[in-house]
Image (tube, rainbow, N blue to C red):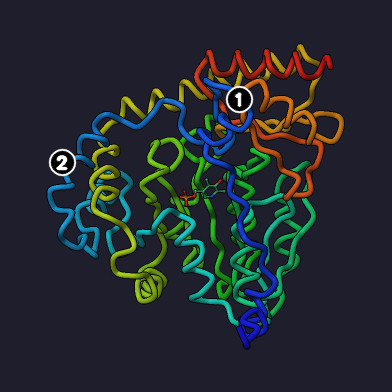
Amino acid sequence: MASDFYALATPGIQGLHPYQPGKPVEELERELGITNSIKLASNENPLGPSQQAMDAAAASLKDACRYPDASGFRLKQVLSERYGFAPETITLGNGSNDVLDLIGRTFVLPGDEVIYSEFSFVVYMLVAQSLGAKAVVTPALNWGHDLDAMAAAVTDKTRVIYLANPNNPTGTYFSAEALSAFMAKVPESVVVVLDEAYAEYVTEADYGSGLKLLGEFANLIVTRTFSKAYGLAALRMGYAVANAQITDLLNRIRQPFNVNVPALAAATAVLDDSAYLLRSVSNNTAGMAQLEQGFAKLGLNWIPSVGNFITVDCGQNATSLYDALLLEGVIVRPVANYRMPNHLRVTIGLPDENSRCLEAFAKVLKK
Ligand SMILES: *Cc1c(COP(=O)(O)O)cnc(C)c1O
């Protein structure tokens, strides 16, 4: 090869590091010589998918020879009935990660500023970096977003602010009141992206979705996903809700067929399966309590979480504990890439998975 293609890439892309995917569970089991491992690493829904969603996805395959409905007409209609926002305010994405990326590409030029918090979801950094933007990372407050610092970081170069509520990997949240106060401080020319991937799990009374504020703040975009409480991570379906102008812009750069036929069918069906959502949330609430009690018994501290995961302070560098847990067949998530080397993030599982996880922690901590 005569050319250095790395040198030909845009500076933003040159600075990116490739995503480090975890090994497939089967491969890991083969390498470690273990079986029956449990995966509590990716905040996936432990219930398995909704039967109604699976049936709808399977039935949709008879149309697999045809392109999907590029407008997502039916799904948008159901979302609109469910939540009350108009179809022309919805942008469908191949997972909400897709729309998080589309938003950056719509509003951010190289050199522009993008604000997000320390310890917030890695995709915001990836979007800013890939676009050659200047990432303005505000220090966290008690592991969560310092909204005052974020508002104060706005300059005339700021184009987009990414907020996660609840946040991953910390599980922290901010109140409806704090969100309103923040929005009131941010100039309308700055787009605020509120990532609500875990909103369905939150039971705290002072939490409020940004969906309620869309009428009041034209610069607000709320993103949601079917990957977590709705249990469809594999199918890749998420969406943004925003004013009609922003939605029109996002739909201009969205690939017309970015969401596929089984995903559209399954997402439409699962919205009707309210029993599934209830089970997701009640399993999560009970599992969170189970893990908190277990970790307390083990003398471990954790970051209070309102998501479907809990991030535990191992009180030491967590790498060797992570490896030891793997040998016990318990796969959790190191978060050293978030500069949290002593923490491990554990997804809430089924009751017996949580028990196994706690037993494994007890065992490896003794060593
Ligand atoms: C899991 C997660 C998402 C969901 O991503 P999808 O692309 O919809 O699967 C979005 N934001 C945060 C903070 C997440 O943790």
Residue type at mark 1: give it.
Gly
Q: Residue furthest right?
A: 316
Q: What's the distance in space between the residues labelled 1 and 2, CA to CA?
A: 38 Å
Whole-percent x, y for residue 349 in the image? 53, 24
* Numbered badge on residue 59: 2
- Secondary structure at badge 2 equals helix
Query: Mark 2 Cα within 10 Å, few/some/many (few <14, many 20+)?
Result: some
Question: Which label lies toward us, 1 or 2?
Answer: 1
Nearer to the camera, 248 or 340: 340
Question: Which comes before the other along the chain, label 1 or label 2?
Answer: 1
The answer to whether 253 appears left or right of 299 in the picture is left
* Numbered badge on residue 183: none
Q: Residue at x 36, y 47 (%)?
A: 235
Mark 2: C-beta under 8 Å from nearest atom of ligand 1 = no
Q: Residue at x 68, y 82 (%)?
A: 111
Quarter containing the N terminus:
bottom right
Whole-percent x, y for residue 282 in the image? 46, 21
Mark 1: C-beta under 8 Å from nearest atom of ligand 1 = no
